[in-house]
Image (spheres, rainbow, N blue to C red):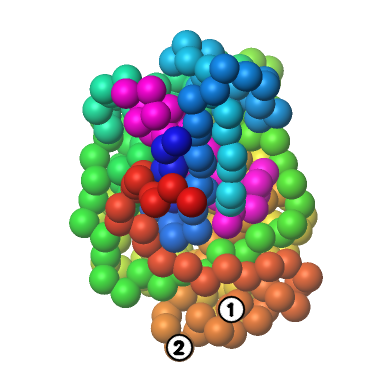
Amino acid sequence: MATWSAPGKVILFGEHSVVYGKPAIAMAIKPRVQVTVRHSRYYQKPNSPYISECFRLTDVKGSVYVRSQLPSASGLGSSAAVTVATLFAINDEFELGYTREEVGDLAFEVEKATQGGRASATDTYVSTFGGLVFIRGSEKRRLLPPQNLSIVIGNSLISHNTAEMVEKVAELRRTSPVIANGIMDAIGGVTMEAMHNLENPKELGVLMNRNHALLDALGVGHPVLSQLVLAARNAGAYGAKLSGAGGGGCIWALCSKGSRNRVAGAIEDCDARPITTSIDTEGARREKDE
Ligand code: MEV
């Protein structure tokens, strides 16, 4: 038996356009998913398509037990964390000998297969390695986390389907390529500006608001997400934007220490769930078997 856990994530900048080679910045966050895999002759096909794909790809048979502190279908990377933790547990239990990098690459293959062939390595990479990361195509780098990055997440409690939202953007690219590509170029520009302003919360907040507006223009917004970002900004956040695939799920707000509780309260007043969390720097890790 082998038990591994992996963290969730927030995409700070660049979701969706990252699927088309533009840059993104993402951060691993503390809530985790824990997966136990046990060698077993009696293989029962798992309910999760992500877990099924992990077993198919590694060509082993076993039983799986999942415990999660992450809300699913909320944009906080729970499917990537389940995939990463399952693959590390399989690697350990069946002594497959993959390195951390190789498990991360396999996790990306699983996400791609279950997202209809369209995915970036953002979620799986950040869940594998932890910390703050920069992704652009095959370029993946860990960044020095800025001091005092105080964030509040707002879960709209509206579930979404990442594959559907990714397909929606692909459809806009097919029907209106000039518009879709123009928006994605602009998101890429905002993300690069953010890279140069990671220690400057005021400027970062302005860039978050721009990124949110561009995601709305791309068609992945939701009225409740807009309500949440406005509530967070009015309560004193430097900036706020949706995070992940959109169409539901979460927003994140950048706050000063002084405004954090006010922002969390404003999110609660919109009947959404505030989550105050911080960066996870470990990535996937082995846990004690219970
Ligand atoms: C989903 O968390 C992020 C997207 O950019 C999809 C991906 O990068 O694979 C929407």
Which stretch is magenta?
69-95
Pick whichever, 172 or 137, lies toward us: 137
Residue 118: % across, % down = 54, 20
Q: Position of residue 32 (x, y in %)?
A: 49, 53
Please give the residue where the numbered disc 2 appears in the rendered image: 258
Marks 1 and 2 sit apart, C-alpha to C-alpha, by 10 Å
- Left or right, 57 with respect to 64, comes to left
Residue 100 showing in the rendered view: yes
At label 2, which amino acid type do we have?
Gly
In front: 193, or 114?
114
The answer to whether the residue bearing label 1 lies less than 8 angstroms from the nearest atom of ligand 1 is no
Relative to residue 161, is residue 44 depicted above or below? above
**Which x, y percent locates residue 20?**
45, 25
Relative to 147, is 247 on the left or the right?
Answer: right
Give the labeled residue for mark 1: 263
Q: Is residue 179 above or below residue 127?
A: above
Quadrant of the frame with the N terminus: top left
